[in-house]
Image: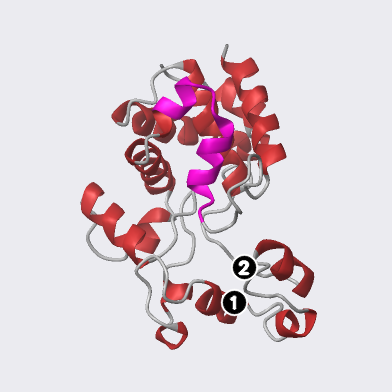
Amino acid sequence: MNITAEQLLKIAPKVGASAGVYVAALNAAMSRYCIDTPKRAAHFLAQIVHESGQLTRVRENLNYSAAGLRDTWPTRFPSVAGAQLYARQPQKIANYVYANRMGNGDEKSGDGWRYRGAGWIQLTGRKNHFEVAGALGVIGDVGAFLETIPGAATSAAWFWWKTGCNKLADAGNVDAISDLINIGRRTGKVGDSHGFDRRQSLTRHCLAVLS
């Protein structure tokens, strides 16, 4: 299926006059990765719209307050004092919270910031960046590619497909999809993914728009 500019504007009004450009990239990416029914498209769009602030953000800025750090990474920032040492320092935060994970080196390597979330599904970590580069034939700066509209759309659809989200969308399983996209920000309980209520609400809205 193809979505229209009118439908996208109902889902992500912030794209504004550029809706046609976004729709072209999204339709190409969704077709390539079998996001080919209204139900699959609705679940996919709900998740990427949530992750990217209505497709307006292609890089994670990590400009968290101390309270925000404790809410997002409670195990890494168990105390207010510890969180205050990192608050409002995006590069320092990234290098700490993403160190020794997802193929990244230690905190001093700078990999956390270099491979912070990018694209509309916020692909994070050296492993994911290198994997998507190989899958999509990207040569050069992977981060720069993920920041383009075609790159953001295609990488999001690729991640969706490779993690089995199409089948989960067929089953209407918002919780499992959200967990896959938010690995590391949950405790394993139903509905505990970061922003789950908003994801669920957006999914219902997208289903209504595309039905």
| Contact check, label 1 and label 2, Cβ < 8 Å | yes
Q: Residue at x 35, y 30 (%)?
A: 28
Crowd around label 2: few <14 · some 14–19 · many ≥20 (10 Å): some
Q: Element under label 2? A: loop
Residue 91 position within the rendered picture, expressed as x and y whole percent measured from the top left: 56, 78
* Residue that carries the numbered disc 1 in the rendered image: 93
Mark 1: few, some, or many residues within 10 Å (few <14, many ≥20)? many
- Left or right: 159 with respect to 19? left
Q: Which mark is residue 207?
A: none
Q: Is residue 28 visible?
A: yes
Q: Is residue 72 left or right of residue 149?
A: right
Above or below, comparing residue 92 to residue 60 in the picture: below
Main SS, magenta residues: helix
Q: Is residue 30 left or right of residue 137?
A: right
Pinpoint residue 44: horizontal percent, then vertical percent.
50, 32
Residue 4 vertical position relative to residue 165 in the rendered view, above or below? above
The verdict on residue 190 being magenta is no
Write the start and end of the magenta stretch as one range: 167-183
Q: Amino acid at mark 2?
A: Leu
Q: Residue at x 25, y 65 (%)?
A: 140
First in sequence: mark 1 vs mark 2: 2
The percent coordinates of residue 90 (x first, y second) are 61, 75
Quarter of the image for residue 104 reads: bottom left
- Along the line of sight, the residue nearer the viewer: 48 or 181: 181
Residue 3 visible at all: no
Asked whether 172 falls inside the magenta stretch, the response is yes
- Amino acid identity at mark 1: Ile
Quadrant for the C terminus, please. top right
Q: Position of residue 68 (x, y in %)?
A: 74, 66
Residue drawn 43% across the image and 73% down it = 114
SS assignment at label 1 = helix
- Residue 62: which disc? 2
